[in-house]
Image (cartoon, rainbow, N blue to C red):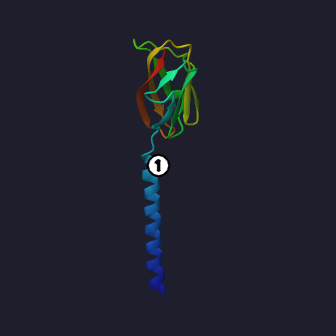
Amino acid sequence: MTYFRAALAARFSRLVLGALIALVAQAADAHAFLDHASPRVGDTVHGAPAEVKVWFTEDLEPAFSTLRVLDKDGKQVDRNDKQVEAAVMHVSLPQLAPGTYRVQWRALSVDTHVTEGDFNFTVAP
């Protein structure tokens, strides 16, 4: 009976250890990836949006995450008033003229991983 208990305890220990390793590995791989945006990636909108809002898959570190909107010449056109609330970042916009705009983002997740990217949207005349 003692041998059976020892074998069972060893199996249980290996199972618990394996589960812990899997959890740690999963947490280590966490990054804040872009989930969706408004305006949507590549979208054409009728009427200028009042803001650009982006949702991420992880909570962000506000001090080190950025969001910018650029015109066709690369000039920043947002109001430079980025706000971060958990996994959502947004910036307000002035009245935009018709044209294509590029949104650039850099996200530092609370677990210290950095991701960055960009996408376009178009304001139709």
Occupied quadrant, residue 90: top right
Q: Give the residue type at disc 1.
A: Ala
Tell me where residue 48 appears, x and y as whole percent: 54, 18
Q: Residue at the spot x=52%, y=20% of the render?
A: 46
Dot 1, crowdedness within 10 Å: few (<14), some or many (≥20)? few
94 or 40: nearer the viewer: 40
Q: Residue at the spot x=56%, y=33% of the render?
A: 88
124 or 109: nearer the viewer: 124
Tell me where residue 108 appears, x and y as whole percent: 48, 33
The vertical placement of 100 against 26, above or below, is above
Mark 1: which secondary structure?
Answer: helix
The vertical placement of 123 against 40, above or below, is above
Q: Residue at the spot x=49%, y=35% of the render?
A: 36
The vertical placement of 8 against 79, above or below, is below
9 or 109: nearer the viewer: 109
110 or 42: nearer the viewer: 42
Tell me where residue 45 appears, x and y as whole percent: 50, 23
| Residue bearing mark 1 | 27
